[in-house]
Image: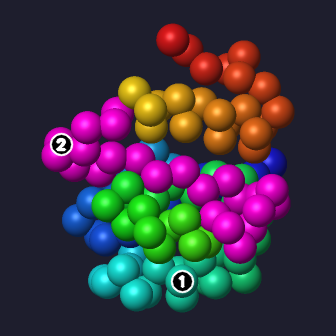
Amino acid sequence: MYKIGAIGKKEKIIFLRSLGIKVFYVREKADIEKGFKKIKEIGDFGIIIADDNDSDEIEKERKKLKDELPVIISLPMSSSSVKNNQKIGELENAIKRAVGTDKILIR
């Protein structure tokens, strides 16, 4: 079974630990690439959640992976994000891609 991970600044993703998600903290946007290298070394991740404020760096990592796992999704980690419905749809698609079905989702 694949694990779910999260990458981002500590103050934005620490709450995900309480959900059983493995978190990888970065201090600056420049550290995101190093964080993804660590995630790849560990392996077994199906989904990686990232802060949508780091979208440029996340998109670079997404392009490197192409259609491989883990699926990288960026979610709003602050109330200033306005694309919440789009991000929820992105999360649903990522779960479907990683798990193979969306029948476990509750709407």
- On residue 79, which mark appears? 2
Q: Position of residue 16 (x, y in %)?
A: 40, 52
Q: Which disc number belongs to residue 33?
A: 1
- Quadrant in the picture for residue 53: bottom left
Point 54% across, 51% down: residue? 73
Q: Earlier in the sequence, mark 1 or mark 2?
A: 1
Q: Are marks 1 and 2 in contact (CB under 8 Å)?
A: no
The kind of residue on which mark 1 rests is Glu
In the depicted structure, whether residue 25 falls above or below residue 53: below
> Residue 24 location in percent, x, y?
47, 72
Name the disc covering residue 50, or none: none
Q: Is residue 7 visible?
A: no
Tell me the crowding category of disc 2: few under 14, some 14 to 19, or many 20 or more residues within 10 angstroms, Cα based. few
Residue 78 forms part of the magenta stretch? yes
Q: Is 81 or 12 nearer to us in this picture?
A: 81
**Measuring 54% from the left and 88% from the top, which residue is drawn there?**
34
Q: Nearer the viewer, residue 3 or 65?
A: 65
Q: Residue at x 76, y 39 (%)?
A: 97
Secondary structure under the numbered disc 1 in the rendered image: helix
| Residue range (magenta) | 62-84
Q: Where is 12 relative to 60, above or below?
A: above
- Which residue of the protein is positioned furthest toward the top in this rendering? 107
Query: Considering the numbered disc 2 on the image, is that residue within a helix, a strand or a loop?
Result: loop
Task: Count up the numbered dots.
Answer: 2
Could you tell me which residue is drawn at 60 percent across and 56 percent down?
A: 72
